[in-house]
Image: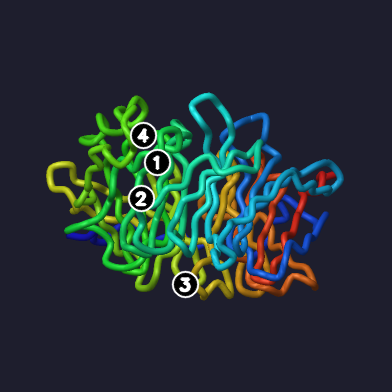
Amino acid sequence: MSGKFTIGSEPVIGLLTPSKKRDYRVTNRLQEGKRPLYAVVFNFIDSRYFNVFATVGGNRVTVYQCLEGGVIAVLQSYVDEDKDESFYTVTWACHVDGTPFVVAGGLNGILRVIDAGGEKIHKSFVGHGDSINEIRTQPLKPSLVVSASKDESVRLWNVHTGICILIFSGAGGHRNEVLSVDFHPSDIYRIASCGMDNTVKIWSMKEFWTYVEKSFTWTDIPSKFPTKYVQFPVFIASIHSNYVDCNRWLGDFILSKSVDNEIVLWEPKVKDQSPGEGSVDILQKYPVPDCDIWFIKFSCDFHYNAAAIGNREGKIFVWELQSSPPVLIARLTHAQSKSPIRQTAMSFDGSTILSCCEDGTIWRWDAVAMS
């Protein structure tokens, strides 16, 4: 059933010697609060707001703007009515009319769609039976978001109409918490998910696309929508031998990481005639020392030239993605940054890197102009 390794060339492993291709320095450090910050994300949906980012920690969602000279300005803050809520993930989406939304989820399993201009809830989506570990936005249709949950399912939502369109779960689904999910950058039908069952699964929405289209024009109450179950992925890969907590598409390839101090780039070779089967070609490995605890997520710039990932010691590794062998662009360390970095965010062009930490701090690193 699952992807088998093919005998081919050995994966190319990157060297941990910084190339000094780009130098970054700390330009700001903010203490947001006492509670751990689990996610930080720039807005890549709307070019007017490329320098705007959101963070989540505890029951708070905060929106900031990166300004010149390392300045970070607070634009708005949403505090959930439940003081025990703990948000784990946040993404940018938008209304069909272009209004920017921030979508957050966490412990309570409720997706909160927040109007980024008005600090108010646009919609709340209840459906998951347990906490939400990641939410991602469809870049080609940014009113569609997908959520990965502890309830072993992935759900597709329309933030415009509030409809749960599809549930990826069932006979061929994940057998433990789903930790990460991602939309394919150009194939609108495809998503990848991974989790605590140590697998990465690729799903296709092609047969169900009429329901996706129907979700935009649905006028009845959302609960009456004929939500469909997608029970079988088109591909299952067993690349890792432990929890897989972050996966991202790199073109038709997949970048994924577990708790074994590396990001792996691999190619799924899907057999169209026999769903679920196929082979895996492991292409490259990007080492990340001291990255052996789960729920550490990497991020990429808009064009996927580089990936930034933090570790449990508060260090950041910036890898060039599209070179072989992989090139370590920079290793970012600071005497005061010692807390585990749960997530990084790279700006549109990769010139700013943000990290959010277990100790409630946000760090801003800016590329130094090369002389």
Location of residue 171 by image quarter: bottom left
193 vs 116, nearest the viewer: 116
Contact check, label 2 and label 1, Cβ < 8 Å: yes
Residue type at the position of mark 2: Ala
Which of the marked residues, 1 or 3, is nearer the chain's N terminus?
A: 1
Residue under label 3, please give it.
259
- Distance between the Cα atoms at labels 4 and 1? 6 Å
Packing grade of label 1 (10 A; few <14, some 14-19, many >=20) is many
Residue shown at the point (66%, 44%) measured from the top left = 347
When the figure is inspected, residue 123 is found, relative to residue 324, above or below; the finding is: above
Position of 65 compared to 227: left or right?
right
Residue type at the position of mark 4: Ile
Residue shown at the point (69%, 52%) measured from the top left = 353
Residue type at the position of mark 3: Val
Classify mark 1: helix, strand or loop.
loop
Residue under label 4, please give it.
188
Q: Which mark is residue 184?
A: 1
